[in-house]
Amino acid sequence: GLIALSACGSSPVAPTPVPIPVPLCQTNSTGTLILANQSASLTPRDVYLDGSFIGALPFGSTFTREVSAGVAHPVVFRSSITGLAVSNAQPNVVQCASITLTNTF
């Protein structure tokens, strides 16, 4: 006998690629600012970022904040005991990058 086989089908279609999600730091144009207290006196520091008090930072600790990239952010470390400024800086964070600012005074 004669046997005939037949198959129907279409050529394989490549799956639709899943779009790579855009990182929030890119969408929002932000970077990460890490503020560290390594004071030689082992005392806490009051930390001001962009003119606002963000908290008392114990010795050996850090604050991490997402900030606008490409602009200077005034940071002041003050003695939590005397209230006097002990150090300051104006870091400019690169988009999607991080920078650590360490107080040692």
Image: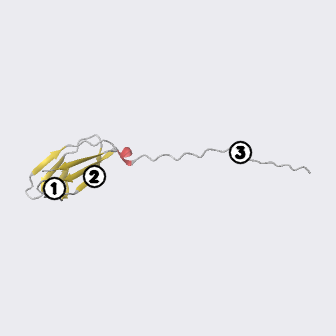
Q: Which residue is mark 3?
A: 10
User: Outermost residue toward the top?
Assistant: 70
Given contact means CB atoms under 8 Å apart, are the residues at marks 3 and 2 in contact? no
Left or right of 71? Residue 89 is left
Q: Which residue is mark 2?
A: 65
Left or right of 71? Residue 17 is right
* Secondary structure of residue under mark 2: strand
- Where is residue 78? Give x, y as percent: 13, 53
Residue 33 shows which numbered tag? none
* Residue at x-position 47% and y-position 46%: 20
**Few, some or many residues within 10 Å of mark 2 (<14, 14–19, 20+):** some
The numbered mark, 3 or 2, whose residue comes first in the sequence reads 3
The numbered mark, 3 or 1, whose residue comes first in the sequence reads 3
- Disc 1 marks a residue whose amino acid type is Asp
* Residue at x-position 36% and y-position 46%: 25
Q: Nearer the viewer, residue 87 or 75?
A: 87
The numbered mark, 1 or 2, whose residue comes first in the sequence reads 1
Rendering colour mode = secondary structure
- Disc 2 marks a residue whose amino acid type is Arg
Q: Is residue 79 above or below residue 68?
A: below
Q: Which residue is mark 1?
A: 46
